Image: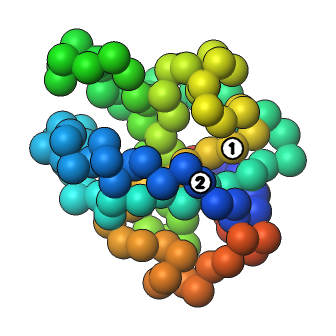
Amino acid sequence: MSVLKGVVVSGMGNFSYWLEKLESFYTQKTGLRLFPGTLNLKLEQAYSLPAQTIRLEKEEYGGTVSVSMVPCRVFDRPAFLLRTDANEAGAGHHPKNIIEIATDIKLREAYQLRDGDEVEVHI
């Protein structure tokens, strides 16, 4: 198991939009009812996804964006690192040293996290 360490940064706030439309797909793929927001972490180094990921393909829901999901743990909670294909290719909204973590609760609130706080993610 590898450990990623990053600092909390503000995100774009658009996961709630996508989750509202695709909640059943995310729940089926992850087994969790995800909170409509992600925790964004800035790593010191770029991070590339492992070869094996859970995939939500754009063809499955008739959309234009495919997403990889990597099971992980944060604060010993089951969670998922989410990344679009465009972000993985270095052509998306986030550079490869930004990771997005989704779980069933609002992590910022539950753990009183603020921008700049360090968080460990166990992959």
Q: Is residue 108 left or right of residue 19?
A: right
* Residue 4 visible in the picture: yes
Q: Is residue 123 left or right of residue 118?
A: left
Residue 47 is situated, as x and y percent measured from the top left of the image, at 72, 34
Q: Is disc 2 surrounded by few (<14), some (14 to 19) or many (20+) residues within 10 Å?
A: some
**Which residue appears at 64% of the width and 60% of the height?**
10
**Which residue appears at 21% of the width and 49% of the height?**
20
- Which numbered disc covers residue 98? 1
Mark 2: which amino acid?
Gly
- The first of marks 2 and 1 along the sequence is 2
The reply to whether callout 2 and callout 1 are in contact (CB within 8 Å) is: no
Q: Dot 2 lies on which element?
A: loop
Q: Is residue 111 left or right of residue 8?
A: left
**Nearer to me, 86 or 47:** 86
**Residue annotated with mark 2:** 11
Please, is residue 32 above or below residue 123 in the view?
below
